[in-house]
Amino acid sequence: MRYSLRRIDAGVGFVELMVVLALIACLAMVGIPAFSNLIIKSRISAATTTLHAAFLLARAEAIKRGKNVVICRSVNSNGFNPSCASNGGDGGEGVGWADGWIIFVDEDSDKKYTARDGLVHVQAAIFNNPAEGAIIPTPNRGYLSFNPTGQTFASYIRFTIRRPDNDTNPAHDKYLCLASGGRVRVDTNMCISK
């Protein structure tokens, strides 16, 4: 009995390779924008959650300690001696509160962090430039003070967690709505004072 040995080609031909590359290119054209949107939405959600948690912490600390607690925007929150920013909430020119913030017990009621005040929390920058996103308060405020009952007694304030400059989809923006009583909520629609 004779066996015939045939040679089997295990290689890939040029045409097959081009078809596979064309399929990969088509899938990439569809998948990359969707992935990019997912990354943007994820970063905006993370920034929203971080700021929301900071407001809840400041309010809870004010109630727990029975003292005024301030949360303020800080451009040097990573520094040795963090301080509140002197130019308020930034007015929309930069990244606003995304520069970072500090939370402290305001022992001397001057709404400025000094050595006498107790530092509660420090948050580093979330976005470094408007191309990444921004957190802009309306009206423009550089700090919020919670009294011992957890109230702010400020006007209704909205924090817009804004999408990157190159993103044209306004649905990616999120909002933190802070009532004068100190309660804060997250919304996907622009806050309306009630």
Image (spheres, rainbow, N blue to C red):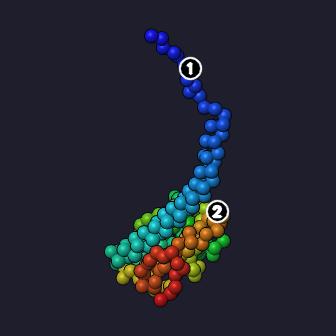
Q: Residue furthest left?
A: 64
Mark 1 or 2, which is nearer the eye?
1
> Label 2: which residue?
131
Q: Residues within 10 Å of mark 2 (few under 14, many from 20)?
A: some
The x, y position of residue 36, in whole percent, is 58, 58
**Which amino acid lies under the numbered mark 2 shown in the image of this protein?**
Ala
Residue at 57% x, 59% y is: 34
Q: Which image quarter holds the N terminus?
A: top left
Residue 66: name its quadrant. Answer: bottom left
Residue at 56% x, 56% y is: 35
Q: Residues within 10 Å of mark 1 (few under 14, many from 20)?
A: few
Residue at 48% x, 73% y is: 71
Q: Residue furthest bottom?
A: 194
- Which SS class for mark 2? loop
> Label 1: which residue?
7
**Which amino acid lies under the numbered mark 1 shown in the image of this protein?**
Arg
